[in-house]
Image (tube, helix red, strand yellow):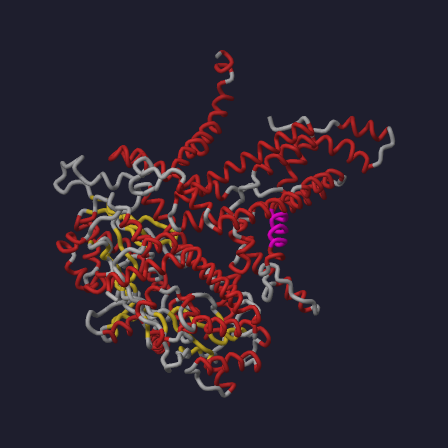
Amino acid sequence: MFNWRKGFAGLLAVVMTAALLAACGGNKGNDAQASGSPPSASASGPEKSEPPKGDPITLRIELFDRNNTPAGAPPITDNFMTQYIQKNFGDPNNIKVEFVTVPRSQEIDKLNVLMAANQAPDLVFTYDTPTVRKYVKDGGLTDLGPLLEQYGQNLKKVLGDEVLEYGVFEGKQYAIPARRVLLPQTTTIIRGDWLEELGLPVPTTTEQFYNALKAFKEKKPGNAGDKIIPYGYIDYFHTRPLVYSFWEWDKISDEDLFANPEWLMPGNKEGFRFLNKLYNEGLIDPDFPLTMNKDTTQFQKDLINGRIGAATTNTNEPVYQGYLAEVQKANPNAKLIPIDPFSDSRGKHPKPVYTPNGIYLLVPKASKNAEAVIKYLDWMALPENIIALQNGIEGETYEMVNGVPQTLDNDKAKQTLYNYTDYLMILNGKFVSLTDEKLNIAANASDPNFKDFTVASIEAGSNDGVTKPTVTAAIESEIKYATTLKEKDDEIFVKVVTAKPSDFDKVYDKEVQDYMKIGGQAVMDEKRAAYRAEKGQ
Amino acid sequence: MKSIRQNWQLYLLLLFPFVYFVLFKYIPMLGVVVAFKDYNIFKGVMASPWIGLEAFREVFAMDGFYNALRNTFVLNLLDLVIGFPIPIVLAILLNELRIRWFKKSVQTILYLPHFISWVIIGGMAVQLLATHSGVVNQILTSFGLKAIPFLSEPIYWIFSYLGIGIWQSAGWGTIIYLAALTGINKDLYEAAEVDGASRLRKMWHITLPGIKPTIVILLIINIGHMASIGFDRPYVLSNPQVIDVSEVISTYVYKIGIQSARYTIATAIGLFQAVVGLVFLLSAELFSRKINDQGIW
């Protein structure tokens, strides 16, 4: 029998219906309620103005549903965070704050549909720059500049000019970027107890790292035997530090760094040759393509069961996802240490770090509540609200230690704080001080049991960090091809790493040629032109 | 008019599917105009400028599109050749079983996978069939055999795709044929028995002709679906290593059209797909009429 499911047809139907609704909404103007939108945007007051304060405004705010609510915790739309916001911001301002959930993994698809249907919340957000640029180009966003000037002084102070600059498109403040408190992306960790067992040094160069992996494979420290995976967590993003260490940095100009696809960087091929060698020598998980970018639970399981020797994870991920504690519970002797092993020919340890802007906060043009949104974000930027929304209730979920909130190790804290960033959207990472960076790092080491691990992770992940230059002009071809090229990155990554060593050059050249053909060349040419236009030769 | 008043309950019941089709199948069809417009989600469909056939031109210039189209045909054709007869065979075999409880339980076990979501099947496939950590291959290697790259090499992947698809849906398909089988006149079997026909002869001369109309209709419908393919099955089973054979139109549209918010392109491909499907359907119908004097209409 055939598969009768019509996933595609369904998908298209959804899009079509959304498109139709958009058409209706667009033509009939304010009859939007007829097409099913909750009576929010248009019910902002004037209809029944007998009571002195009028009906409350409903402020609709997007909220990521990460599907990670711990057992026993209240729903994400009615918990400590939402109640705190309603009580301290909503009630005094006669605003009813309503959270609209969007599944994290389909964030962009869903946002597009909401936007097209004129049903987007008053405050929406995305990490994806091409999506923001597309909205700007299509005229779908509110210019927040004047409102920010009028109502957002606290917000401006917390974010700072450098961060806000990232939200300027075509000369207008169409987006308010969140401030990223900590910039490192990834940190490599290694089983320190295994190194000791085998009498190996803590790796500080790529070569020492390779020797350690080799020794893990051959001498089988711990008790996983043949099941050892010397180097885990393999995907495009998390192998950047390794690959960057092969780049010939003295041959790469700022313009190259901005415009070149990474596949064309001098030395990139050698980085992949090295990864290919690791694969063919059995030093990385041979099944990595099956779970890559989909699911890291297998990795966590392997790590906890003492099968993983080393891995490059998101910085501090073992702490904030809680699996470092599990590793220690499963084997009290296990010692994971953050290291910075990948060294280039100059002896440096280059690795990408984030720019200081986080998620983009946007107000759709159709929203009538832009002013309330800015007031909301400005309220959020007050220190007492930052502390409360990041740490919960003093004495119950955290306590102050030397001016730094320290999360308590109890169920209440776990159930309250697991998704705090989704409410406190203006900051990415814990934040206590505008001036003292050390206090902020300490605040992010919020689990007292692993404070040293966190601090060391952040330091290793920041060392010799590289950010790519940016231009303010929109790169049209990038808007068009970005998603396709990103998928292609993953495809090439897998094909090149798993190729037979004798085929490596052939596969690499063919795939990269393909990449250039399906949009890579167009993006590179346009980026080069834009860079030269803005920065001069 | 009178009959409507008399049987209004029946007409009322009919109203719901009717409304369903108008609301979810016919009205969305108007959306195909998006394929001919530079669709701006904020302006809406009507206000977006016309671009004529520009979107189709762009689609037909994409290499990936032809690759996806080819894979769609190949996977669908294999599904048809290998997957289509299996429910028929299963239905006939089940029909021959005499012990009622055994027949019922086999039937239930066979169609149970139909109710498992593809996402879960995808997870199971990795757990079972992964080249190194999968249970099946661990058993194989423990007997000293070589591991089989079920999901990591194109040719093997195609067979895994087919096998998993058959496992998931064959039992369900059997039900339709079993229903058709109950419609066969019992007298025919008795008459054949009197004439001394063997079991196989009865199957060949009575059972199969009895369900022939059902087989033909399902075959025509399946051929009509040649250019379209479900989204979830290829999507969950695919991985970057086999993308050359696993990228099909539905997943390609998702990538190019939906994820990049290029609805014009997505709609253009969708329209193209519908047209190809229609051509296949009509030719199958025509062919079947010529050969068999039997078709859908």
- Which region is colored magenta? B158-168
How many numbered marks does the figure carry?
0
Which of these two is toward me, A331 or A150? A150
**Is residue A446 something that shows in the picture?**
no
Q: Position of residue B120 (x, y in %)?
A: 53, 53
Which of these two is toward me, A511 or A292? A511
Which of these two is toward me, B123 or A525? A525
> Residue A405's image quarter?
bottom left
For the point 58% across and 73% down, which residue is it? A227
Which of these two is toward me, B235 or B241? B241
Identify whether A136 is placed above or below A418: above
Q: Position of residue A462 (x, y in %)?
A: 33, 74
Determine the main secondary structure of the stretch shown in magenta. Answer: helix
For the point 35% across and 56% down, which residue is it? A478
Q: Position of residue B224 (x, y in %)?
A: 57, 36
Q: Position of residue A205 (x, y in %)?
A: 42, 82
Among all residues in the image, which is located at the extreme top? B2
Among all residues in the image, which is located at the extreme bottom? A199
For the point 60% across and 26% down, which residue is it? B297
Apparent side of residue A364 relative to residue A243 in the rendered image (left or right): left
